[in-house]
Structures are given as structure tokens and as C-alpha cells.
Amino acid sequence: MIETSLLIVDTDAALTDALRRYLSKDRTFHVVGTTDTGTEALAMIQAHQPDIVLMDLLLPGMDGISLLRRMRSLQKAPVAICLTEFYSALCVNAVRRSGASYYIFKPAPFESVATVLREYAALIHEHAVRRTRESEAREEDEFILRIHGELRELGFSPRYSGSGYLAECVALALRSPMLLQNLSSGVYRELSLRNNVSAESIERNLRTAIAATDADGHLSAQIGCTPTNRACIQYVLRRLNFLT
């Protein structure tokens, strides 16, 4: 289970301690610290980079609105949830404009506070997963472009479907080197499932693309041996500095 880091900011020491002990029993949360001033809260946010800040508005040193505005300007801004007895429509609007995500009125049952925190913890996790997937997809796209660039330099023509299969073979071999141990049951099988064609067809198309590229012997000279399917995959990996 991924823990969500949490900072509690409140001048009520008894409430802060009780909340810390209550939330620490929930494996969803990791309380990184507590403080009773806005100035110290900002320093702790910068030091610990918590996912969520549960905070009062009436704080010494730096009031809650000012703290919210300072948090919003941080590169990694935490989710701010206000827990306060100070209420007015103007205050709620000001808090939301300043960057707070939620507003809880005191006194509130700890389970109600925890429920809100869990909801935002789930949103934070979902957002992190989505960002990771998007980053991985960008890296994958960039790597595929690098592979195709190497193949073009070697003389492979995109007119041959085997050129595309070769690029996919290289990408698969990078992610799972074990697939190179047996091409038929490894990369060919994976590609056949992805492209809904037989492994034999993939192998044949690879040979066709390689033979056409090596018609003048240039590819053989580059690789330094007969350009078999395996030799070509390994050579491209070496050109990309992923194989010695």
C-alpha cells in the first residue's frame, strides 16, 4: 500500500496530537510532522514535501491565507485541506481562491476528517500513476524514434514491413533481454500476438527486409558478419549503447 504523507498545522496541541495518533493508525497515511505556526509549516513543507497539508487558518507568524498562497507557488505544491472553526462565506471563497482544495468545519469527527483525506489520497495516487504512465509512454515513443533513426541510417526502408518488425524486436529485446535467447518463442511470439500474424510471417518479413538492405553488402560490412535476424537486432542495440 502506498502511504500518503501528511503535515498537520494547528495551534490546538491536544487536537493535533489526537489527530496525529488517530491518523497514524491508518496505513493510508504517514504523518511527517506537526506544527502550530504558519512560518514553521512552510519550512516543513519545503523540507518534507508532504502530499497533503491539513491546516487551520488562524495561525501565528503567518496566517492560513498567506500560507496557502505561499504553498501554491511551490514547485511541488501539496493538497491543502482546511480544518477550522472560522467560518464565513467570504472566508470560504478566499480560502478556495488561495488554493485550498477542501474546507472542514470544527468540530468534526476524526473519521469524517479521515474520509476526506482518503478521498484526496486516492486522487493523488491516481494522478501520480497517470503521470508515470504518460512519462513512460513519452520515453517509449522517443526510444522507438531513435530505433527507426538507426535503421534508416543502416539503409532499412520503411516500405518493408520487416523494417517495422525489426524496430519492434529491438524495443522488446531492450525491455526483456531473455526474449533474445530463443527468437521463435521469444520476440517472434510476442510480435505475433501484438500484430495478429504468425511468428513465421514475422521471421520471413525480417529476412526480406534485411536481404533488401544488404543487397550491396553494406549492411554485412557494418555488422561485420552475415546479417541474420539476431545479428541485426543485437547490432542495433549496440549502436544504441544498450548492448556491449
Image: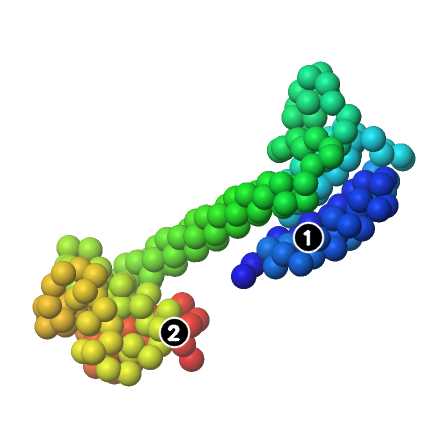
User: Could you tell me which quadrant the C terminus lies in?
Assistant: bottom left
Q: Is residue 15 visible?
A: yes
**182 horizontally vs 43: left or right:** left
Q: Residue at 15%, 55% (x, y): give it.
A: 159
Quadrant for residue 29, please give it. Answer: bottom right
Residue 126: x and y in percent read 49, 48
Q: Residue at 73%, 33% (x, y): give it.
A: 106
**Numbered-mark total:** 2
Quadrant for residue 211, please give it. Answer: bottom left
Is residue 61 depicted above or below 91 in this figure?
below
Q: Residue at 75%, 38% (x, y): give it.
A: 55
Near mark 2 (Cα within 10 A), the count class, few <14, some 14-19 or many ≥20, is few
Residue 228: x and y in percent read 20, 78
Label 1 sits on a secondary structure element that is helix
Q: Nearer the viewer, residue 217 or 231?
A: 231
Quadrant for residue 158, please give it. Answer: bottom left
Q: Is residue 75 visible?
A: no
Q: Amino acid at mark 2?
A: Arg
Which one is earlier in the sequence, the residue at label 2 or at label 1?
Answer: 1
Q: Which mark is residue 23?
A: 1
Q: Residue at 31%, 68% (x, y): give it.
A: 172
Task: Evaluate if marks 2 and 1 touch, with contact meaning CB atoms under 8 Å apart.
Answer: no
Is residue 160 depicted above or below 184 in this figure?
above
Label 2 or label 1, whichever lies nearer to me, is: 1
Is residue 103 depicted above or below 114 in this figure?
above
Q: Amino acid at mark 1?
A: Leu
Residue 35: x and y in percent read 83, 46
Q: Nearer the viewer, residue 234 or 155?
A: 234
**106 horizontally vs 127: left or right:** right
Residue holding disc 2: 238
**135 horizontally vs 75: left or right:** left
**119 horizontally vs 138: left or right:** right
